Amino acid sequence: MSLLPNVDVRTRTTSGTDNLSAIRRRIVLSAPKVDRALPWTNHESPWAILVSEVMLQQTQVVRVLEPWRKFLESFPTPEACANASQADIIRHWAGLGYHRRARSLHGAAIMICSDFGGKVPTSPDLLRRLPGVGEYTANAVASFAFGEPVAVLDTNVGRVLSRALANRPLQRREAQDLAQQLLPKAKSVIFNQAMLDLGAQYCRAVPKCEECPIAALCRWRQEGGVDPSKKSAGVSRPQSPFEGSRRQARGRIIRALGIETLSLSQARAVVGEKLGDQTLDVLSDLRSDGLIEERNGRWSLLA
Ligand code: SF4
């Protein structure tokens, strides 16, 4: 029986074949073609996989590759990360932005050492106890590091599901259930990776349907209509421009504080003329996030 009575995933085609099974099979077969050969794929260290997944939460793959490699050089184990100062972890987050993730990862490393004997926990439920680890990251680590049969649902997978399977926008929970229903019992790791790769390489915001290996089975391609992924939960919307944004100001201040402490006027100079009058607000936000502190009129990374 379908787990999803409200989602018509067209389980039977006119030729009588099971469409869900056919798509599942086609995705597994297309794994070598769509493979992006990322360095954390099949990595032997669960910690390296956890670090990659946290970095990938809000940053594109291409911007994660080098910081991930350098971070693991400095902090190859949860213990090495836990023993470092938060300020040092944040310095190693250079170029990735969204520095709250660095703070969370540091907290996760400390918890792994204190509560899990220094080993990354294996199940999604235990992984979700770690700071900064939500459903996606927990499932991704459980699958890619430990082979747990749990479906991974990110923005790329969400597009594939809403377009190829449902041809309608999906709520977050039904997308997760549909992903789980589609997941094969065997080869679940290969399947999860192939879904991520398929969404990232072909089923992009502007899809490359002509080259897509599952085009012949895709509902949206066959039936047409408005792109259903645009209103699907979990599918990210384009970010506002970085140039001139508060994110840019935050990044500049964090980068400068990685080298030396700053007075307010120095911080204003670092932020630049365009956002200079927001400097104190940005500093206050960073302090509220537990990333920086102010003592005697000078700002520094929180140790
Ligand atoms: S055919 Fe196009 S819309 Fe369908 S899954 Fe492939 S890339 Fe996505």
Image (tube, rainbow, N blue to C red):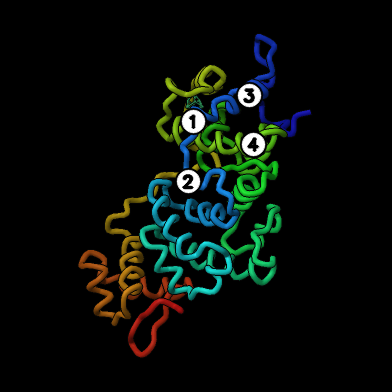
The reply to whether dot 3 and dot 2 touch (C-beta < 8 Å) is no
Tell me the amino acid under the disc marked 2: Pro
- Circle 3 residues within 10 Å: few <14, some 14–19, many ≥20: some
Tell me the amino acid under the disc marked 3: Arg
The Cα–Cα distance between marks 3 and 2, rounded to whole angstroms, is 25 Å
Is residue 123 placed above or below 22 in the rendered structure? Answer: below
Check disc 4 and report its element: helix, strand or loop: helix
The Cα–Cα distance between marks 3 and 4, rounded to whole angstroms, is 14 Å
Q: Earlier in the sequence, mark 1 or mark 4?
A: 1
Q: Which mark is residue 269?
A: none
Check disc 1 and report its element: helix, strand or loop: helix
Mark 4 C-beta to ligand 1 under 8 Å: no
Q: Which residue is mark 1?
A: 34
Q: Earlier in the sequence, mark 2 or mark 4?
A: 2
Q: Which mark is residue 39?
A: 2
The Cα–Cα distance between marks 1 and 3, rounded to whole angstroms, is 14 Å
Image position of 213 (left or right of 135)? left
Front-most of residues 39 and 114? 39
Considering every residue shown, the one lying at the far bottom of the view is 296
Tell me the amino acid under the disc marked 4: Ala
Mark 3 C-beta to ligand 1 under 8 Å: no
Considering every residue shown, the one lying at the far right of the view is 1
Q: Which mark is residue 179?
A: 4
Tell me the amino acid under the disc marked 1: Val
Check disc 3 and report its element: helix, strand or loop: helix
Q: Position of residue 215 (x, y in %)?
A: 51, 20
